[in-house]
Image: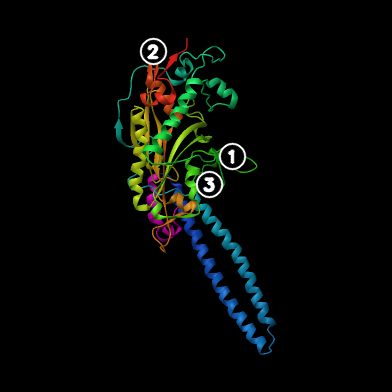
């Protein structure tokens, strides 16, 4: 969340910085917090004045009793003051709760490098490789018409198992829950293993196997609730959430902790399935694997000192790009404009890959800096040196990578008419074969 002191001292600047997001409601939200904060400080001043009055009266009562005088009137007056203090304490708790709730609904301030604009208007900062063109079948057709070569002993209704069976997946769990089989399942597993090995062995991330459910406090710390609770899968009655991304458990590893500055930066990598309702995206890109409710993802999270945040963001993004380069997948790096920036994000680079079968650039990674926004919500601090005052850390994360759309592009880019689907050489030792064959 944003620093209440910064809002209090210069709300106009905060509003001006948030304006790049293009949301006219944010000014009203900030002004409301300022009014509530003014009411809070007025209540605190009144309570402190009454407590001073009560302390003075208590001393006077003690002195009167010591002199043998009747103090009943003074006692009655002090009791009245105490009753008023209790009433004000209730009012103070209520206004503090409104301030907390208001802060939770105000997004992060965009980095000064973030341009104005809406989805699809972000500048292309870099490009790598040559996107394939030509008429290519979409991945849902390729996945259902290709499978493992010579699947000895493998049985599936109709013959050779296809790489994916979207119809049966929908029957089992509904639309948006794809079913991968044989070659598709092995490709998914191989990609996960390849990326975990790369990041843990070459990029020096500590591999983590986190829980697949998280608490409400964990979701709140990363900014996923209360704003986007409708997009999450929640369990009842224990009020746990299926992870929307490994960002949530990894970032919350150090919630309510004070870290040693010498230990920073921290770097974590994890694979998890990810679950998202995407309630606001109904009917958009629903064919095949383009927009699903469950998908696998390898996630990178870094925790660092504020002065290292920009450098750490570039490093994390390069780690994600390295995956695409090793897979020989052409990509481009996009700087997201303010109107397309995530709620908790200060700055985001999207990595997009070209899917020639559906003729679209697909986001496969978002690499973001959150500055101290998540750290304030999760109370993640560090001490730069002994006896120094703790500071809020900066948090960053990025997909490296999300599998569903990566599989889309590998199938469509690797397709050879009449000759199967070639896989990147770096995956051959992981997957155990070099191509998917047409099912005859």
In the picture as drawn, the residue positioned furthest to the bottom comes out as: 67
Q: Which of 271 and 117 is in front in this view?
A: 271
Q: Tell me if mark 2 has few (under 14), some (14-19) or many (20+) residues whose alpha carbon lies within 10 angstroms of its own.
A: few
Q: Nearer the viewer, residue 179 or 189?
A: 189
Q: Quadrant of residue 337?
A: top left
Q: Residue at x 64, y 40 (%)?
A: 236
Q: Which label's residue is closer to the chain start, 3 or 2?
A: 3
Q: What stretch is highlighted in magenta?
A: 1-21
Query: For residue 306: magenta?
Result: no
* Mark 1 secondary-structure assignment: loop
Spatial separation of the CA atoms under disc 3 and disc 2: 48 Å
| Number of the front mark, 3 or 1 | 3
* Mark 3 secondary-structure assignment: helix
Q: Which label's residue is closer to the chain start, 1 or 2?
A: 1
Q: Which label's residue is closer to the chain start, 3 or 1?
A: 3
Q: How many labels does the image show?
A: 3
Q: Nearer the viewer, residue 329 or 38?
A: 329
Q: Please tell me whether residue 227 is drawn above or below residue 95 in the rendered image.
A: above
Residue denoted by label 3: 218
Estimate the x, y position of residue 10 in percent, counting from the top left.
Answer: 39, 59
Query: Can you tell which mark lies on residue 419?
Result: 2
The answer to whether residue 336 of the structure is visible from this angle is: no
Residue denoted by label 1: 234
Query: For residue 7: magenta?
Result: yes
Q: Do the residues labelled 3 and 1 touch (CB within 8 Å)?
A: no
Q: Are marks 1 and 2 in contact (CB under 8 Å)?
A: no
Q: Which of 436 and 7 is in front in this view?
A: 436
The answer to whether residue 210 of the structure is visible from this angle is: yes
């Amino acid at each position: 969340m944003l620093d209440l002191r910064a809002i209090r001292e210069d709300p106009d600047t905060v509003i001006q910085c948030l304006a790049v997001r293009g949301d006219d409601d944010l000014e009203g939200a900030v002004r409301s917090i300022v009014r509530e904060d003014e009411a809070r400080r007025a209540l605190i001043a009144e309570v402190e004045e009454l407590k001073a009055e009560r302390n003075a009266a208590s001393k006077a009562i003690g002195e009167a009793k010591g002199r043998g005088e009747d103090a009943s009137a003074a006692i009655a007056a002090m009791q009245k003051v105490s009753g008023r203090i209790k009433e004000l304490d209730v009012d103070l708790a209520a206004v503090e709760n409104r301030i907390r709730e208001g802060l939770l609904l105000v997004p992060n301030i965009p980095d000064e490098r973030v341009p104005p604009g809406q989805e699809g208007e972000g500048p292309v900062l870099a490009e790598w490789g040559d996107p394939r063109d030509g008429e290519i079948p979409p991945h849902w057709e390729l996945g259902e018409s290709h499978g493992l070569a010579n699947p000895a002993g493998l049985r599936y209704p109709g013959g050779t198992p296809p790489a994916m069976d979207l119809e049966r997946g929908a029957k089992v769990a509904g639309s948006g829950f794809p079913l991968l089989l044989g070659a598709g399942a092995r490709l998914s597993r191989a990609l996960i293993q390849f990326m975990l090995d790369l990041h843990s062995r070459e990029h020096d991330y500590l591999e983590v196997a986190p829980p697949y459910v998280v608490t409400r406090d964990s979701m709140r710390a990363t900014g996923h609730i209360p704003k986007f609770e409708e997009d999450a899968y929640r369990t009842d009655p224990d009020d746990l959430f299926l992870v929307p991304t490994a960002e949530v458990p990894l970032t919350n590893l150090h919630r309510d902790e004070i870290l040693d500055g010498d230990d920073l930066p921290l770097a974590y990598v994890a694979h998890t399935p990810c679950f998202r309702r995407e309630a606001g995206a109904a009917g958009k890109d629903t064919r095949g694997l383009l927009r699903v409710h469950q998908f696998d993802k390898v996630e990178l999270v870094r925790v660092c000192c504020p002065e290292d945040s920009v450098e750490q963001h570039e490093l994390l993004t390069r780690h994600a790009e390295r995956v695409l380069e090793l897979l020989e997948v052409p990509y481009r790096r996009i700087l997201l404009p303010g109107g397309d920036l995530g709620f908790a994000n200060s700055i985001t680079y999207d990595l997009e890959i070209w899917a020639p079968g559906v003729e679209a650039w697909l986001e496969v990674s978002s690499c973001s800096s959150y500055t101290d926004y998540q750290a304030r919500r999760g109370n993640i601090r560090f001490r730069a040196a002994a006896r120094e005052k703790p500071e809020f850390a900066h948090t960053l994360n990025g997909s490296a990578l999300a599998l569903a759309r990566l599989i889309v592009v590998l199938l469509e880019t690797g397709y050879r008419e009449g000759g199967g689907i070639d896989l990147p050489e770096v995956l051959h030792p992981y997957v155990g074969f070099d191509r998917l064959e047409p099912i005859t």
